[in-house]
Image (cartoon, helix red, strand yellow):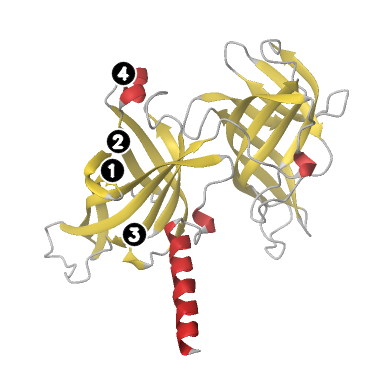
Amino acid sequence: MAMIWTLLVSTLFMLLQSQIGHGWRTPALTPPDGNSLKLKTKAYNGKYVYRCQNLQWVPVKATATLVNISDNTQSFGRYSLVYRPGNPDFLGMWYLDNTGNDMAESGKLVSVLAGQGIASEPSDYSGIPQVLAQASYHQNSYGVAAQISYIQRLFTKGGLPPSNKKCSYKATKDVVVPFQAEFWFYTQDFLPPTVPSSVAVPSNSRMVMGFFCKGVAVYTYNGTAWHRTDFQGKLFNVPGGNYLGTYYAKRTPDGNGGSFCLETINPYAWSVTAKIEGHSAQVNPDSIPWSLFNVTSSTGNTTLLGPYNYFQMIGCRGGLPPKAEDSAPKGATYKSVFTNQFWIYSPA
């Protein structure tokens, strides 16, 4: 019996370890639906540099070579962080080597992106926090990093402020602290993810394009509850990518009841107005719901890929009002950042 129990515990431990190895342990650090894992790398020879300021160790910079997680001799590029006191969530920059088609397409040896931390969890191994970052900058529109949308910093070890050196007015030298981590890179999918039936597009429609949206929802407290009074977002091809248009609500609905508007600014600019179709789906309790919109009117050049009949707002993150118990003075406003993907459809 003891042997069976030992075997059961061992099997359970191995299962949990395998889940941790796949990142399943950290749902808060998981990118939104509609993004897929593209590349896993490991920080090799990672170094955090700390400086003594006002009797505290503060981070100055960090560097590492990015290598294959199972082969330190296979390099994928490098990682660099210059600490920004005014932007503590900035996670750094990644310089990924272009090879093969990526090099031919971009004409550059290196593809560069930056990331902004949007969620974190403590390390399991006495290290700097584990982080989910959203891409905030792409150097160009081509190369291995061009479509990267999210970056995870996982399995961190080390890199914390030095505990064996005293920070005093006499401390004049920077201190280097080694760190270990894995950086996992995700790209935005070219097709929408599976969605709940309530926000599914009718089968006689076809997807023609998609956008990443980052925006702000404004809520106002009426004395008893928070109500959304405004919202506006910007459309990009990918997080940190090219600006392509806006998402907003019209003050006066069109003649068919539509008030939610997508508007592009490209050479073939168009605008569609829509209303929510059916019931939205609360996929993530910490984010605004997924919704299906029925296009009620359009303007501009919609003939290239249109006419458009539906669009979906899915893969949502954030955008909720304060909790019900978080009361405030009547008339107070609250701004909540949200992100999502829009998928545009036309009749098949």
Separation (CA) of disc 2 from disc 4: 15 Å
Which of the two marks, 4 or 1, is nearer to us in this view?
Answer: 4
Amino acid of disc 3? Thr
User: Which residue corresponds to mark 2?
Assistant: 95
Please say if the residues under marks 4 and 3 sit with CB atoms less than 8 Å apart. Answer: no
Mark 4 or mark 3, earlier in chain: 4
Q: Is residue 269 left or right of residue 236?
A: right
Q: Which mark is residue 79?
A: 1
Amino acid of disc 1? Tyr
Mark 2 or mark 1, earlier in chain: 1
Q: Secondary structure at mark 4?
A: loop
User: Which residue corresponds to mark 4?
Assistant: 107
Disc 1 crowd rating (10 Å Cα; few below 14, some 14-19, many 20+) is many
**Which part of the image, by quadrant, shows the C terminus?**
top right
Q: What's the residue at 26%, 25% (across, down)? A: 109
Separation (CA) of disc 1 from disc 3: 15 Å
Q: Position of residue 58 (x, y in %)?
A: 27, 58
Q: Secondary structure at mark 1?
A: strand
User: Which residue corresponds to mark 3?
Assistant: 156
Name the foreground residue: 254 vs 77: 77
Tell me, yes or no, if residue 51 can be seen here: no
Disc 2 crowd rating (10 Å Cα; few below 14, some 14-19, many 20+) is many
Q: Is residue 241 left or right of residue 167?
A: right
Mark 1 or mark 3, earlier in chain: 1
Q: Is residue 130 left or right of residue 30?
A: left
Name the foreground residue: 312 vs 100: 100
Please say if the residues under marks 3 and 2 sit with CB atoms less than 8 Å apart. Answer: no
